[in-house]
Image (cartoon, rainbow, N blue to C red):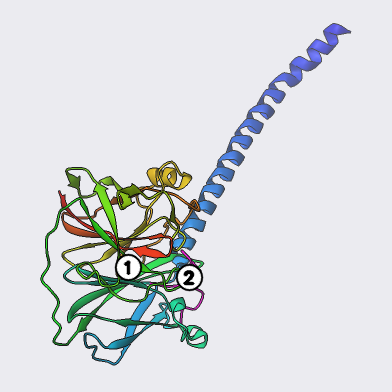
Amino acid sequence: MQSQNSRFFSVFRPIVRVICQYCTVAIVFILLFFQIGVTQEHGGHNARKAHNTPPLNVALHTDPQTISAGAPAVLTFHLTDGSGEPVTDLMVHHARVLHVLIISENLQIIGHIHPEDFESRDILAELAGMYTVHFTFPAAGRYILAVDVMTADAEFAKYVYVDVGGEAKMADMVQDFRREKAVFGYTDEGGDRYTKAVSLTDARDASVYHAKMVAPERIKAGEMVHITYHFSRDGKSLTDLVPFLDAPMHFAIVSTRLDGVVHTHGTVPGNANANKMMKDPHTGHKMEKEPATGHQHQGTTPEKFGPTVMLMTTFPEAGLYQIFGQLKHADQILWPSFMVEVEN
């Protein structure tokens, strides 16, 4: 009986072997097909995401049309997509729907304002893509206006220029490479607001602090750099700094070429946010004519911190840069500013 079974299986053994071989080949093909399909699906998803991110166009309308130094001006930014339709789905990021950074060509005057800062905010106009701020330019000359917004699709950064007339001429640019200096603080207008222009050389109605900046002796373009700020007052280190617009410190970095603005944020050493920036040197964003996307706004800021705040950034090109800062102590908004030279 055992012999008969052996003969029986010996007859079918080649057939079974062939069937197993075909099954193995079939399984391999199925797995390859599945893998290719998954890869194509992910590739298609990423391509669709990049392809479907709509462009953002920004047009500036001013009232009056010709702006004069010392006279209030209304600045309305008209946001449209690639089809000319209004962009109205702005998301709140860093406590505001739209950030406007205003910097003079001599790198001595700065403003940081938002539509929410003004009681005259027009929600109906914003539904048509029109976002308005008010500003008084203190001196005649050219200014760069950088606009930073975020939608559900992406983050966008744009800039435009404004030429201001009048007899109050802008002072010449000054190269100042000091690493310790007096810093002026101005009283918060309420809700992290300060809507006036700040001049680095005009300390009227300002409180006085002290800031020290520690930076590498040589800063190279294209390489991440760590810069540390230390703040004090009356010889005592400040350990009770508070968040300003959901960040320990805001920065606007501008070169003497006035060809763009890097708007980024500081971190508290030892905080989880600092670790994230260590991993991603491009946290923050460069204000460009083309959309900038994929920037992080993660992490939390302690309720109290200090006296140290850290900046990690990458300078795109060689040249001279002014690093404007903005942070808060009690009800005072501080505006430290330091100049650095970047080499190739």
Q: Is residue 100 left or right of residue 173?
A: right
Number of numbered discs on residues: 2
Q: Which residue is mark 2?
A: 191
The image quadrant where one finds the N terminus is: top right
Question: Which region shows up in magenta?
Answer: 85-99
46 and 85: which one is in front?
85
> Which residue corresponds to mark 1?
290
Q: Is residue 284 left or right of residue 179?
A: right
Q: Position of residue 269 (x, y in %)?
A: 40, 43
Give whichever of 243, 207 is nearer the camera.
207
- In terms of secondary structure, where does tag 2 sit? loop
- Taking the magenta stretch, the answer to whether it contains residue 344 is no
Q: Position of residue 121 (x, y in %)?
A: 47, 84
- In this rendered view, identify the residue nearer to me: 293 or 42: 293
Q: Amino acid at mark 2?
A: Gly
* Callout 1 secondary element: loop
> Sequence-wise, which precedes: disc 2 or disc 1?
2
**Amino acid tagged 1:** Glu
Name the side, left or right, on which 169 lies relative to 304. left
